[in-house]
Amino acid sequence: MQTYRSMRFGGLMAAFLFLTLGLLLALPAHAKPPSACAPTTFSLSGSNVDNAWKQVTNSQWSNMLPMIWQDKGFHFYARVRERGPNAGIQTPSDLESEIRRGTATTTTTANRYQITLNIQNGSGSFMKVFYDYAGGKNAKCELVTLSY
């Protein structure tokens, strides 16, 4: 015969499992990378795309980005100027080629995505382009950083 205490414990465990399952089903799944920000949409324009990074100003960089992409605060621009040349990304055109060949995936941060480039450092880590995309009518793909 079950005691009151064991029946109460069993009921509490069942309620806990039911609530946990309900919460997990109610949470939205992390979406796949948005098609608007697919690597193939990254196409630079302008006469400066073949200039070395040291010759490209932040204004020129901003103007060559596709309409759906932006670099607020130019943190990404600073990182690619710093890290790009050592990784074989000598010009904005080189960056475009690498991004277009990259693979887009999700991250654990909401609305943050990454494009893994085919460039590895000495320890075997792949270079990644991180960007944010919140969705919505006027949403932009916002470049965040370039990192291993």
Image (cartoon, grey):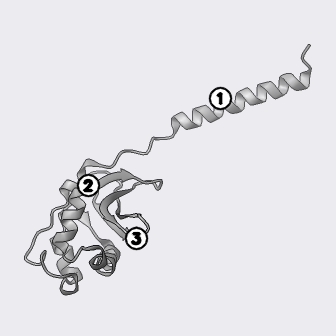
Q: How crowded is mark 2: few (under 14 residues within 10 Å), some or many (20 or more)?
A: many
From the top left corner, tell me how far across and down residue 42 is, in percent: 20, 60
Q: Which of the two labelled residues, at mark 1 and mark 3, occupies the earlier sequence position?
A: 1
Give, as a three-letter code, the residue at label 3: Gly
Q: Quadrant of the N terminus?
A: top right
Q: On the image, which quarter does residue 83 sit in?
A: bottom left
Q: Mark 3 points at which residue?
A: 122
Q: Which residue is at the front of the view, 84 or 112?
A: 84
From the top left corner, tell me how far across and down residue 106 is, in percent: 39, 51
- Looking at the rendered structure, the number of numbered marks drawn on it comes to 3
Give, as a three-letter code, the residue at label 1: Phe
Q: Mark 2 points at which residue?
A: 37
In the picture provided, is 91 more to the left or to the right than 82?
Answer: left
Q: Describe the element under mark 1 as helix, strand or loop.
A: helix
Q: In which quarter of the image is the C terminus?
A: bottom left
Give above or below for 123 relative to 48: above
The extreme top residue here reads: 1
Q: Which residue is at the front of the view, 88 or 21?
A: 88
Q: Which of the two labelled residues, at mark 2 and mark 3, occupies the earlier sequence position?
A: 2
The extreme left residue here reads: 47
From the top left corner, tell me how far across and down residue 93 is, in percent: 16, 70
Give above or below for 11 relative to 69: above
Which residue lies at the image location 18% right of the left edge and 82% below the top edge? 52
Which residue lies at the image location 43% right of the left edge and 45% below the top edge? 30
| Contact check, label 1 and label 2, Cβ < 8 Å | no
Q: Mark 1 points at which residue?
A: 18
Q: How far apart are marks 1 and 2 (CA)?
A: 38 Å
Give above or below for 80 relative to 139: below
